[in-house]
Amino acid sequence: MEAINFNDFTPMERYEIIKEFLIKMRQANSMPSAQRFFEHYLRKFYKPPDKVVNDIAYCQRAMKTYLLIHQTIVRVFGEQEDAVSTHLPPEITEYLSLLFFQDPVIKNSYLHELEEILYEVNAECQYMLLRLQDDIDRFCLAFSEQELKPDDEVINDIVSGAIVPLVVSVKVSLEPYFVSVRPTEQELMRKYFITSDVSAPQLRLHAYTTTVVKESRLNLQAALARTRTPQVDKAERPKEEFMQSVGLITHMEKQRINLSQELRQTGPKQYSLPPKKQKAPPQPK
């Protein structure tokens, strides 16, 4: 039987040939040999459906991407909040806190949205895995009717050998067949960190503020790249190097852009520091 090339037969012909063979093996009390043939048959002739494998790998890639963006948002908000509280002049700290860091609604809404999408992608992936399991069951039907079960390790080897290379290979482009199309990492970065331009509010701050805003526009892309790279321990950095490494200047611009959707709905909001208290003019006697 091991010399037969079952690829030359239709699924129904395979079923009939294997069924007759297994009946004879049971009558000869040679089921251990039948089990070994079962493993050989699986490894040599079972090929998972290409479209199902494609979509499982596509879902796995999408989940990795959404998890990466989720972690990036948590890290960026946390790092910038910590940096603002420690490394900026008081007037800049007050300005940024007024704009962003005292309001966790934006960050939480982003994270909640990503988590909901992760549930959806995982559900689609589980559905495709069920379709793959059904295909395996049909392939093994003649054996299961004779109370022979496929070896789990053999099945895992076959399935992982088909799916894992597609998940990890950056050179292989995947397009979904049965599941939803998901945005790429670059598209998600643009969605959550770079959207339409929003003009900076005009504030009467120290001259340093103007420099901050100009530098933020120039350094936005570099700061986004830094958020995806491992960072050195903060204690080992000078203050200036640390501020640059976490993209502090860029984050102000980035967070302002993240508010663009809300601004489009409610109109541009002008933020400013509370006016300084002025001495009251002397009352005429």
Image (cartoon, rainbow, N blue to C red):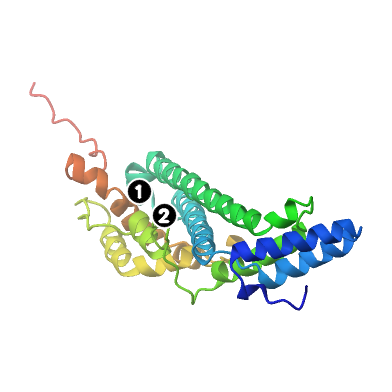
In the picture, the quarter occupied by the C terminus is top left
Give amino acid for label 2: Leu
The front one of 156 and 80 is 156
Residue 111 horizontal/vertical position (percent): 45, 45
For label 2, the SS is loop
User: Could one spot residue 263 in this view of the protein?
Assistant: yes
Q: Is residue 48 left or right of residue 154?
A: left
Callout 2 environment at 10 Å: few (<14), some (14 to 19), or many (20+)? some
Residue 165 marker:
none
For label 1, the SS is helix
The front one of 194 and 125 is 125
Q: Quadrant of residue 46?
A: bottom right
The reply to whether the C-beta atoms of the residues labelled 1 and 2 are less than 8 Å apart is: yes
Q: Residue furthest top?
A: 285
Residue 267 horizontal/vertical position (percent): 16, 42
> Residue at the spot x=79%, y=54% of the render?
148
Residue under circle 1? 96
> Residue at the spot x=26%, y=52% of the render?
205
Foreground: disc 1 or disc 2: 1
Residue under circle 2? 88
Q: CA distance from mark 1 to mark 2?
A: 10 Å
In the picture, the quarter occupied by the N terminus is bottom right
Give amino acid for label 1: Leu
Callout 1 environment at 10 Å: few (<14), some (14 to 19), or many (20+)? many
